[in-house]
Amino acid sequence: MYTLGIDIGSTTSKCVLLKDGKEIVGSSIVVAGTGTDGPSQALENVLNSAGVVREDISYTIATGYGRKIFQGADGEISELSCHARGVHFVFPDVYTVIDIGGQDAKVLSLNDQGRMMNFAMNDKCAAGTGRFLDVMASILKLDISDLEKEAAKAQNPASISSTCTVFAESEVISQMAAGTDLPDLVAGICQSVATRVASLARRVGIKERVCMSGGVARNAGVRNAMSKELGVEIVYSDMAQLMGALGAALYAYDKAKDSNPTVS
Ligand code: ADP
């Protein structure tokens, strides 16, 4: 039996296709979020990659910022619950999830069963989100996926003192003009995101193991800075950006089983 999770974010659309609630048989990420054709593209891509047609899917759950306006799902569940579920599936021993997406950052604390017990969220300010990194990458004329390579070469990470994205943008431009090395600048930018989100994490309380999820987790510069900032190891999977969609696909499996109890 196939179930599908679709995570419709502010900047990207992600799908995970699950077989029998256990096996991930397909996934897709399209850099276009809610209000675009990103969700339908992501859906088409995952079906094509797995050689599955829409009619083969028993149940679909949508999650993410755009989940309520998406027409193609059988139900919707909040991204907090879906991230918790997805992370617990991949890392059953994780108790703290730091999820940094395109426009927000969330820290979740989980219990032994992977159920969310507490959370803190920043969705008011671009600093400490993927948006901050996207803006900085564009000023530095780098691709978002190149930030980690640059940060890894840093000798003396720059200090970005502005907490506001708009002011930080001017600060980065001034530092470029003053001749700060690119790697040092990029490492300072990654550090700035980690510092912001670490303070959110401290509000929730850090219990190991700690996992990072969301698109920004793909950046090792931010993961390493976060690890130093919090003094803990950060657990990471290649599935980081897909955790919400994975959780949605797992919830979809529960729903499909409820409506057909003869299925194991
Ligand atoms: P949302 O669900 O809010 O749309 P995501 O969790 O998909 O957000 O994260 C999107 C963010 O992830 C982007 O704003 C970008 O900063 C970051 N990102 C995306 N791809 C990469 C990559 N290859 N390497 C590093 N960071 C990335």
Image (tube, rainbow, N blue to C red):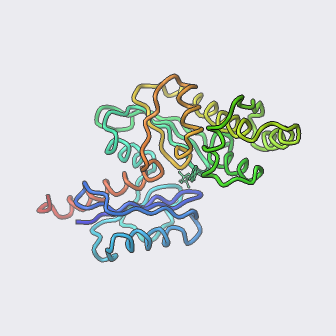
Q: Position of residue 4 (x, y in %)?
A: 35, 63
Which residue is situated farthest in the top direction here?
Answer: 231
Task: Report the residue at 55% width, 59% height from top.
Answer: 12
In this rendering, does residue 50 appear at all? yes
Residue 16 found in image quarter: bottom left
Task: Report the residue at 44% width, 56% height from top.
Answer: 63
Foreground residue among 32 and 146: 146
Task: Report the residue at 87% width, 40% height from top.
Answer: 174
Q: Position of residue 49 (x, y in %)?
A: 38, 70
* Relative side of 71 to 260, left or right: right
Compared with 237, 66 (above or below) is below
* Relative side of 119 to 105, left or right: left
Which residue is situated farthest in the left direction here?
Answer: 262
Compared with 152, 245 (above or below) is below
Q: Position of residue 172 (x, y in %)?
A: 80, 41
Residue 85 found in image quarter: top left
Q: Position of residue 77 (x, y in %)?
A: 40, 54
Foreground residue among 179 and 117: 179
